[in-house]
Image (cartoon, helix red, strand yellow):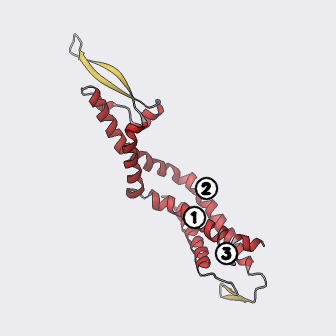
Amino acid sequence: MNEGFIRQRRNLYTVSGILLFCFLAQVKISQLSVVGISFSGFDKPEVTFWFLWCIWGYFFYRFIVYFYEYESCTFKNFWRREMGRYCDIYLIQLARSQCSGNYLNNASSYYQMKANGWTLSFQEEKDQDEIGGVIVENRIIKVYWWQILKYQIFGIIRFTTMTPAVTDYIFPFIGSLLVFVFAGILGLWQGALFEIIN
């Protein structure tokens, strides 16, 4: 995992945690201490919350940028691996149910099948030619979404429970959005965005 992405994720977690704490504790700012210097008697304490929300927006943006730049391929690889894990086995079983032979393991993968309009391509041994070689015929089977739905669900369950994709990528994104929605938009407290604007 990219070090820059880890930093952005950590910073996003930190500022989201601070905002969530302020929301849940209904914090009202009357004193601020920065690098050992104390400030008190604020006429406009909402400036502090504006500052926190701006920092949140900055780190959320950076998290998204670093994800697309450095981690989106890893996320897609996790997804493709887990979806293919069960779906590819089913497709080989489907090919074997239609014919027999040594070439059935060459059946197209789940993603190849989807790219080909939900048609499974594989090779079937037909006979031997006059010099003892194997005659192979290309076969195509139409696959319907409901046939493979169970295996897709297994892939999704495995993706969400057995890969780090959820904790590394999805939780920070969803958690930060929930903080924004509940503490920033729907929250009735001093640091809510609607309270700051008014």
| Amino acid type, residue under disc 1 in the picture | Gln
The answer to which of 177 and 12 lies nearer the viewer is 177
Marks 2/3: CA–CA distance: 31 Å
Image position of 103 with respect to 37: above or below? above
Q: Are marks 2 and 3 in contact (CB under 8 Å)?
A: no
| Amino acid type, residue under disc 2 in the picture | Val
Image position of 134 with respect to 66: above or below? above
Marks 3/1: CA–CA distance: 28 Å
Residue 43: name its quadrant.
bottom right
Image position of 164 with respect to 94: above or below? below
Q: Are marks 2 and 1 in contact (CB under 8 Å)?
A: yes
The answer to which of 111 and 3 lies nearer the viewer is 111
> Helix, strand, or loop for circle 2?
helix
| Amino acid type, residue under disc 3 in the picture | Leu
> Helix, strand, or loop for circle 3?
loop
Quadrant in the picture for the C terminus: bottom right
Residue beneath disc 1: 8
> Which is nearer the N-term, disc 2 or disc 1?
1
> Helix, strand, or loop for circle 1?
helix
Mark 3 surroundings: few (<14), some (14-19) or many (≥20) residues within 10 A: some
On the image, the x and y values in percent for residue 64 come to: 59, 57
Residue beneath disc 3: 188
> Which is nearer the N-term, disc 2 or disc 3?
2
> Residue 65: which numbered mark, if any?
2
